[in-house]
Image: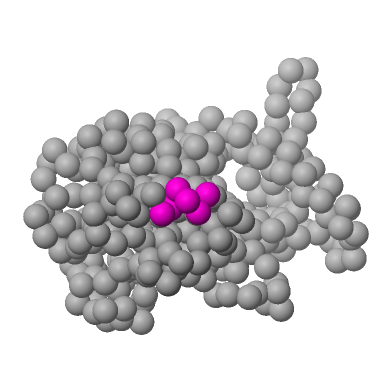
Amino acid sequence: MKKILIITNSDDLHADLLIPLLVKKEHTPFRINLDHFPRDYQITQQFYQGKLTGEILHIPSAEHINIENVGAIWMRKSASFSYLSEDLSTQEVAFAKAETDHALFGFIYSIDCFWMSHPIAMRGSMWKTEQLQRAVKMGFTIPDSLVTNTPDNVHNFNAHVKGDLIFKAMSSPALAADEVDEVDKISGGLATTLVTSEMLDGLDAVAELPCHFQAYIAKQYELRITIIADQIFAARINSQEDTRTSVDCRDMSAEITYKAIELPEAFKQSCRDFISSYNLNYSALDFIVTPENEYVFLENNPNGQFLYVEQLIPEFKMLEAVADSLIKETTCRSQ
């Protein structure tokens, strides 16, 4: 029987909760926590007489996995590597990271298996402006949008857009706060923000780096559409119930309601086709539903979180769907 490989970090609650489900279904996965790799692991790859063999051993547990024994990979979360020596110089760490990347990803990219989802597919699907272009090509409505580091372009865009503008980060609303040490943090993040007249009068900072602006779209509610293999979980987010979430629904301090919603079949298929065009087996799509019941595409999250949605809508069995998909594909490859 082939095994399921989970690649993540030690703080991933999604993986923590999935593993007991897999074990209950008689599939014990092998987990690589990247923040403990390669410190707590031994990796071996060998070409002998034209044949590749490989093994990763988890030293504390003595569990191991062979390259030919992987049926499915769940690619979850990244992390900085750890090494046996804690006093490596900056150059040594940079070199160690590059070599570890080659060793680990050379190992896993060699595996012919089911991926949820392949890192190359996830990286290719994460770029916000490319997502918008693809969404238009595939028939979705999008907000008028601008990415620029020229302040005059923002003024011109504002003059032509009817109504308000919003500013939103393209990479992460955390503003890279999760990438630096606590002592180096200067901000905890920035939610999607309405652009005020005062902001328009002080756009010089836009010249520092490309910034993302969109026309503000009036909302009836928002949709989080999570696609796991061939299953769709559509969550209606009643973001207009609270002023804290009226512009950005991600403020979890506001107790707004989430509920399961049924989507038109044609729209569901369009969502499936969209993520399939990236060769993804998992993704979370965000939409606005306007007061006129029009769906407006916002973004694709190829590795977006889903556990909070399941916690707010208990009838969504999303962890079960992930487990069943990984087991199904692993079983198929074991026969």
Q: Residue lying furthest top in this view?
A: 49
Q: Residue at x 26, y 72 (%)?
A: 246
Q: Residue at x 63, y 45 (%)?
A: 65
Q: What x and y, as percent, mark residue 164?
A: 29, 62
- Whether residue 23 is visible, yes or no, is no
Of helix, strand and loop, which mostly describes the magenta segment?
helix
Task: Give whichever of 254, 145 is nearer the camera.
Answer: 145
Q: What x and y, as percent, mark residue 39?
A: 77, 58
Instruction: Specify whether 308 is left or right of 98.
Output: left
Instruction: Specify whether 90 is left or right of 108.
Output: right
Q: Quadrant of residue 168?
A: bottom left
Q: How many marks?
A: 0
Above or below for 27 versus 182: above
Task: Give whichever of 146, 94 is nearer the camera.
Answer: 146
Is 153 included in the stretch rendered in magenta? Answer: yes
Task: Give whichever of 152, 168 is nearer the camera.
Answer: 152
Q: What x and y, as percent, mark residue 11?
A: 57, 68
Q: Quadrant of residue 251?
A: bottom left
Q: Residue at x 33, y 42 (%)?
A: 229
From which residue to which does the magenta span run? 150-155
Q: How is the image coloured?
A: one colour
Above or below for 66 versus 31: above
- Whether residue 49 is visible, yes or no, is yes
Task: Give whichever of 306, 161 is nearer the camera.
Answer: 161
